[in-house]
Image (cartoon, rainbow, N blue to C red):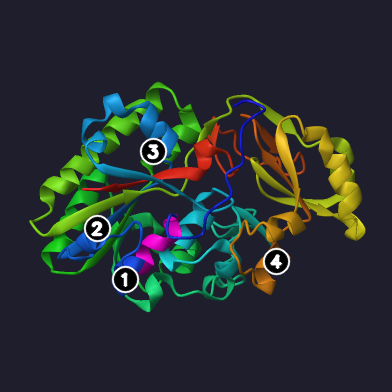
């Protein structure tokens, strides 16, 4: 990624991941979900975690089925991370409204890992009730089939972003197809499905051979789903974010910034700094040490530019830090006070084009 990399601020309009579910449920066409799509007997929406538009474009010649789809590039949300984006997809609102403003969020119990719904090694579903933490009703209060990994059923994040859904767990990618086909055969009008293998492979192996092989598998998986759909059903595919290969280019947070902060939150490509003694201006100046590889942005600037949408609740605002180091280059910045941070080869969270643009595919 070059120094000239342009920041992609989310649109929060009809060309956003958050516009899909509301259009389907309300049967109100928009720029993405056309009248022809809404005329289908059943709409299946498949989220492929980690399928960025740039990654898809790069490998189109190896993905014959995906390449044949009607395709549009749309934006995800900020930060471009799973917990935030999936919640925007299912609720249909930007992060400023639903409040899941990152991967790790400060709470009265400590730093909440939103995907595990844990603080450190402790699960905190009772201490940080998901329905209170994220109050916007997923799926506009309706009850579509939700087809995701079976082990997610009792998780706090599932309660936060998938409650109301009729949970249908899958134990293997093959049975993901089975569960979709079963629900469509029951005559439901809308099915939500989620597959996370691509994201996992990218994190562990980066965006090279393993990622390409998993992409080829996703291509075959989508083809299998379409083969199982009856006439009159349609499949839509999108994603929560793209990815950037950072390899070993991981930097420890500078010692001066450690001293000036009470804590950090977010993640390594969108690292929030929480100032000591309400001193964001000095913190902003000190963070310029990373200006050659990252955008240094204050919370106030983000709010002015509507990174989290036109409305930010008081609770969501309190969950933000004072200044963020938002990676521009292929790098990650980690807090040495949080030694449990995983070593990931490919990452996401920032506002680069590779992370922010995702596909909207129609079959």
Which quadrant of the view contains residue 173?
Answer: top left
- C-alpha gap between disc 4 and disc 3: 32 Å
Residue at image location 22% in from the left, 60% down from the top: 37
Q: Mark 2 points at which residue?
A: 44
Q: Which of 177 and 282 is in front in this view?
A: 282
* Residue with the most extreme left position: 231
Secondary structure state at the residue bearing disc 4:
helix
Q: Name the residue under label 3.
A: 198
Residue at image location 45% in from the left, 55% down from the top: 16
Residue 125 lies left or right of residue 302; in this view the side is left
Residue 227 lies left or right of residue 272; in this view the side is left
- C-alpha gap between disc 1 and disc 3: 31 Å
Camera-nearest label, 2 or 3:
2
Indicate yes or no whether the magenta region holds residue 279: no
| Residue 115 visible in the displayed image | no
Camera-nearest label, 1 or 2:
1
In the rendered structure, which segment of residues is drawn in magenta?
A: 16-22
Camera-nearest label, 4 or 1:
1
- x and y percentages locating residue 174 in the rendered image: 21, 45
Residue 181 lies left or right of residue 328; in this view the side is left
- C-alpha gap between disc 1 and disc 2: 16 Å
Q: Name the residue under label 1.
A: 28
């Amino acid at each position: 990624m070059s120094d000239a990399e342009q920041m992609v601020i989310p649109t929060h309009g009809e060309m956003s991941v958050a516009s899909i579910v509301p259009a389907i449920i309300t049967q109100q066409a928009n720029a993405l979900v056309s009248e022809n799509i809404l005329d289908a007997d059943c709409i299946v929406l498949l989220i492929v975690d980690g399928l960025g538009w740039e990654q898809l474009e790069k490998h189109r010649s190896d993905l014959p089925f995906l390449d044949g789809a009607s395709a549009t590039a749309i934006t995800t949300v900020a930060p471009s991370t799973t917990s935030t984006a999936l919640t925007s997809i299912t609720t249909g609102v930007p992060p400023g409204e639903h409040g899941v403003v990152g991967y790790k969020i400060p709470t009265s119990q400590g730093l909440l890992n939103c995907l595990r719904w844990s603080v450190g090694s402790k699960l905190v579903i009772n201490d940080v009730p998901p329905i209170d933490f994220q109050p916007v009703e997923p799926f506009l209060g309706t009850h579509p089939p939700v087809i995701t990994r079976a082990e997610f059923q009792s998780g706090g994040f599932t309660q936060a972003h998938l409650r109301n859904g009729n949970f249908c767990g899958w134990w293997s990618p093959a049975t993901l197809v089975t569960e979709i086909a079963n629900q469509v055969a029951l005559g439901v009008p809308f099915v939500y499905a989620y597959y996370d293998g691509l994201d996992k492979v990218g994190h562990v192996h980066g965006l090279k051979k393993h990622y390409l092989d998993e992409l080829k598998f996703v291509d075959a998986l989508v083809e299998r789903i379409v083969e199982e759909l009856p006439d009159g059903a349609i499949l839509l595919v999108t994603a929560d974010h793209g990815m950037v290969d950072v390899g070993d280019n991981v930097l420890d947070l500078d010692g001066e910034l450690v001293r000036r902060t009470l804590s950090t939150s977010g993640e390594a490509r969108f690292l929030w700094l929480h100032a000591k003694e309400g001193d964001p201006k000095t913190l902003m100046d000190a963070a310029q040490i990373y200006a050659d590889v990252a955008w240094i942005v204050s919370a106030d600037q983000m709010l002015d530019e509507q990174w989290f949408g036109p409305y930010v609740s008081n609770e969501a605002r309190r969950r933000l830090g004072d200044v963020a180091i938002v990676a521009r280059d292929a790098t990650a910045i980690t807090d040495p006070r949080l030694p449990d941070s995983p070593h990931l080869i490919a990452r996401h969270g920032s506002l680069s084009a590779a992370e922010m643009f995702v596909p909207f595919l129609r079959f």
